[in-house]
Amino acid sequence: MTLSLDETPRIVTGSLRRAGWDKLGRGLYAAGDRTLAEELAAWSRVLGTTAAFTHLTATELRGWWLPAPIPHPVFVATSLREHHRRPGLFACRHPHPGPIELLDGLRVTTAAETLLACARDLGLLDVVVLGDSALRLRQCTIAELRLVAARRRRGAPLLRTAIPLLDARSESPWESVMRVLHRAAGVDVVPQREIHTDAGAFVARGDLWLVGTKRIHEYDGEIHRAPDVHRSDLERDRRIVRAGWQRLGFTSRDLLHDGASIISDADRLLGRYWDPCRLDAWNDLVANSLFGRTGRSRAYRNWRRTEAS
């Protein structure tokens, strides 16, 4: 048995039969309780000098929100002269590799390049969630995104469509989803709207304000069902009502599967007639994202290829 261990015995290249280790690829092993950074450090040992982690692999390393986490290969961007054909690895080959950054000692494509890579085979809703997170973490700017989206590259048209929908004020992935739902339905909204009393006292800050109304829409995750949080939420709701405002909360299931109710309720508030095209627009966004079967199937179909150009 021939082994090559790194400074900390978490990565092995060669041949290994030992409990607690996983085989990542041919001649490549990593400890079963490894971190993502350790796993990618293992992959780095079998990659060329131009390779950099990208796509969903880079988004996870960067700590971005994931739209709907699903199993995926390890994504790397390389030059045309490098060929990597290993199970579990998806190599995207480029004539001119883009700029990279070092993160935890690992070569990673820049935030803008990473989002462009995701736009190749994810849906618009997915890209908005990822883009909101990147902007919120200040890992890229709208100007940088516009620069990469202006190039003649796969994913650029979708990224150009996503950029006007991005908003760094989003505080969670489901807030991003909720904002896109309203935008798809033609409902003008403003994130993180502060509510004050007539005397100017601060009351609350709402996830989404329906412009022209005194209503806010908010995402209610599981954390809001904890006793202490629930009690605080009820007190906040009473303050909002006393200030003359209305608050409606929605779960992730409401947003993905009951868009008709949310849109029709907004229509009544805004004095609009029901238009099924608004619901169709939202349902298409969900279906073509990682939240929907069509979007997941497209992604898996693309990822079955071992190498892309």
Image: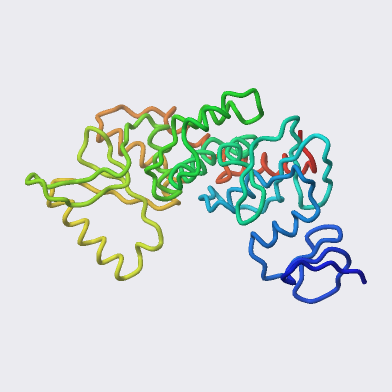
Q: In this figure, which colouring scheme has been used for the structure?
A: rainbow
Above or below, comparing residue 269 to residue 59 in the picture: above
> Where residue 135 sits in the image (x, y, percent)?
45, 42
> Where residue 229 sits in the image (x, y, percent)?
31, 66
Q: Is residue 225 left or right of residue 293?
A: left
Residue 194 sits in quarter: top left
Question: Residue sitting at 74 percent across and 54 percent down?
Answer: 44
> Which quadrant does the N terminus fall into?
bottom right
Point out the residue furthest to the bottom here: 19
> Where residue 39 sits in the image (x, y, percent)?
70, 60
Which residue is more in the foreground, 286 or 170? 170
The count of marks equals 0
Point out the residue furthest to the right here: 1
Residue 55 sits in quarter: top right
Which residue is more in the foreground, 38 or 5? 5
Which residue is more in the foreground, 304 or 96? 96
Above or below, comparing residue 298 to residue 1 in the picture: above
> Which quadrant does the C terminus fall into?
top right
Question: Residue sitting at 62 percent across and 31 percent down?
Answer: 155
Q: Is residue 286 left or right of residue 109?
A: left
Question: Residue sitting at 68 percent across and 51 percent down?
Answer: 72
Q: Is residue 129 left or right of residue 188?
A: right
Question: Residue sitting at 40 percent across and 53 percent down?
Answer: 251
Residue 54 sits in quarter: top right
> Where residue 287 sits in the image (x, y, percent)?
56, 39
